[in-house]
Amino acid sequence: MIKFAFYLAPDGKVPQRISKDDMSGLAATGKGLLWVDVEDATGEDAQFLIDVFHFHPLAVADCVSKDIHPPKIDQFEDYLFIIVHGINYHIESDVVETTELALFLGKNYVVTSHDVPMRSVASTEERLHVSGRPLRREVDMLAHDIIDALVDNIMPTLDELDEKCADIESEVIERPRKETLSSIMQLKRSVLALSRIISPQRELVNSLARGDYPLLGKRSHIYYRNIYDHLARIEMLTQGLRDLADGVLATYLSSVSNRMNEVMKVLSIVAAIFMPLTLIAGIYGMNFVNMPELQWQYGYFVVLGVIVLVGAALAVFFKKRKWF
């Protein structure tokens, strides 16, 4: 559905919220600046975008489809179609999920489309209500404001993942549990989800900063370059988190292996102590008639004493060798 639409007239007055019926005429004038936001687009919304803005059906289909599309930019005759990814804050999951934001950039309009509410769009709309500034700086700068807010909103998630990694690392060192492995794998999947979109998104913004598209004015290039720098830093931090997660997993596996080795060592020592004791008990449990010790009055107590003495001697020997 169309969530909102604002229009800034050529005379620069305060941006006005407009109705669906007014969009067609305003978009066709090529003047002013129109921003239309579509959330959870339906087939009806798709047809409206095609009829009013004459967008290519394949580009509109990407907005309606629930499939995941990688960050990309397509240049059409008189508009650009851009897909970028941000953090999905509206899904209950232990693994970070991303969501798409599609932007159509024309001569005098920006159309945004997304499946779930996005903080970058909401924050830009809020600034619009306060000062109207986002619509006062032409199409390229409005798109910059939205994409910049989207990239900035990735940093808090990275900070949370970094804190989670530190907590897991402490847990691994102090007392690893079965649940610890699940937490590590969730962390790795979260970092991988970010890694998959950051690199192509960085290259996309780089192409905008280079001035590959005439629709974007020269003054906007340095602003997109700033977004590129932020993405490069995010990519570096993500790679660092990925290495940390791999290190934590290796530490966990090593810790579990060491604990198992300790258990096996204790069991081996117990078995080594009881082997000679079992041998003694086995010899005197054969009940042969010609075993002279069977008729000895103190034989039972002597054998028990020998068993205790041998067991104690082996225990002292292993203790001196620091095997336990």
Image: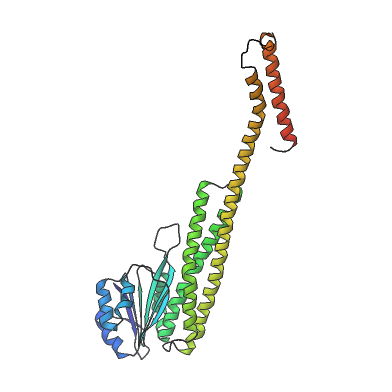
Residue at 57 percent across and 65 percent down: it is: 240
Residue at 54 percent across and 74 percent down: it is: 232
* Residue 225 in sight from this viewpoint: yes
* Residue 131 in sight from this viewpoint: no
Residue 54, quarter of the rendered image: bottom left
Say left or right for 160 vs 298: left
Where 84 sits versus 253, above or below?
below
Q: How is the image coloured?
A: rainbow
Say left or right for 268 vs 198: right
Q: Decide which of 214, 226 is in the foreground and name it.
A: 214
Where 184 sits versus 100, above or below?
above
Count of labels in the image = 0
Q: Decide which of 34, 228 is in the foreground and name it.
A: 228
The location of residue 262, given as percent across then percent down, is: 63, 41
The location of residue 141, given as percent across then percent down, is: 44, 83
Where the C terminus falls, by quadrant? top right
Residue 144, quarter of the rendered image: bottom left
The location of residue 120, given as percent across then percent down, is: 42, 72
Where 45 sits versus 141, above or below?
above
Where the N terminus falls, by quadrant? bottom left
Residue at 56 percent across and 70 percent down: it is: 236
Q: Decide which of 196, 85 is in the foreground and name it.
A: 196
The location of residue 105, given as percent across then percent down, is: 38, 83
